[in-house]
Image: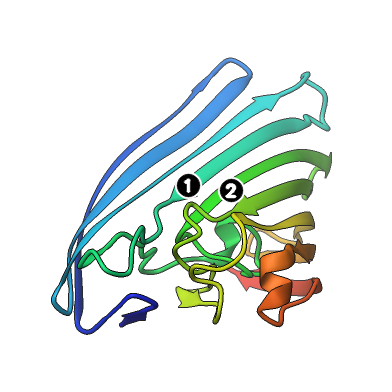
Amino acid sequence: MQFPSASGNERRDLAEVRFAGVSGRFDWDAEAMSQTGRIGSQAIRAWATGVVVGETLGSSTVQPRITLQVDAASGDKSATDNQLNTFNPLFPSGYYFTQAGYTTYANLVHVKGGVTMTALANLKLTTGVGVEWRETVADAIYTLPDVPVPDTAGHGSHYVGTYGQFRADYNLTPHIALALEYVHFSVGATVVSAGGHDTDYLGAEVRYGW
């Protein structure tokens, strides 16, 4: 494995605490994680945390649900301290933020507000806006699964970018589900200076389950 300030064989031990529940109109899902281990000759000391809080409004068939999601994952503080602080999401899924998968759970602070509603019996519509920053400018901006964007470590500002998302999920049958998702990501000056640009994602899914 290779990071901007460390490379070599990597071993991580992960400890996690999670708390989820529902009370009346409100629901929540929170977790905190700590990683220790070694990469090459360097020690690993990293952390991450995230929480999603939702409120379901009214009792109509539409049932709009407002959500607030906040996430943070550590980045490497120094390239010369013989310690790697970059959190490694290990087996990340783009679905946690969006299916576009532009960024990942490493050196990240992420805030997202969203609204979900059931338009029809089998149709769920979701829209949201998210803003992302780096936890530390000393480390890179990362894309899925944990790939550093070249020339971003130690350069630019904390701000990474802002995205808007729209997603429709439709249960065609008890075994077949369809989904359509659109994401527009507007990048900040740090990504632009590294050769990046605003981008759009459109994806369609067909899932079969039993």
Q: Is residue 137 visible?
A: yes
Give residue 110's mark.
Answer: 2
Q: Position of residue 125 (x, y in %)?
A: 80, 48
163 w.r.t. 71: above or below:
below
Q: Nearer the viewer, residue 177 or 64?
A: 64
Q: Which residue is mark 1?
A: 72
Please give left or right for residue 5 compared with residue 9 in the image. right
Give residue 157's mark.
Answer: none
Task: Choose the circle earlier in sequence order: 1 or 2.
Answer: 1
Picture quarter containing residue 85?
Answer: bottom left
Picture quarter containing residue 54?
Answer: top right
> Hey, what amino acid is under mark 2?
His
Q: Secondary structure at mark 1?
A: strand
Q: Position of residue 61 (x, y in %)?
A: 82, 30
Q: Nearer the viewer, residue 167 or 7?
A: 7
Furthest residue to the top? 24
> Hey, what amino acid is under mark 1?
Ala
Query: Which residue is rendered at x = 66% and y = 25% of the image?
Result: 55
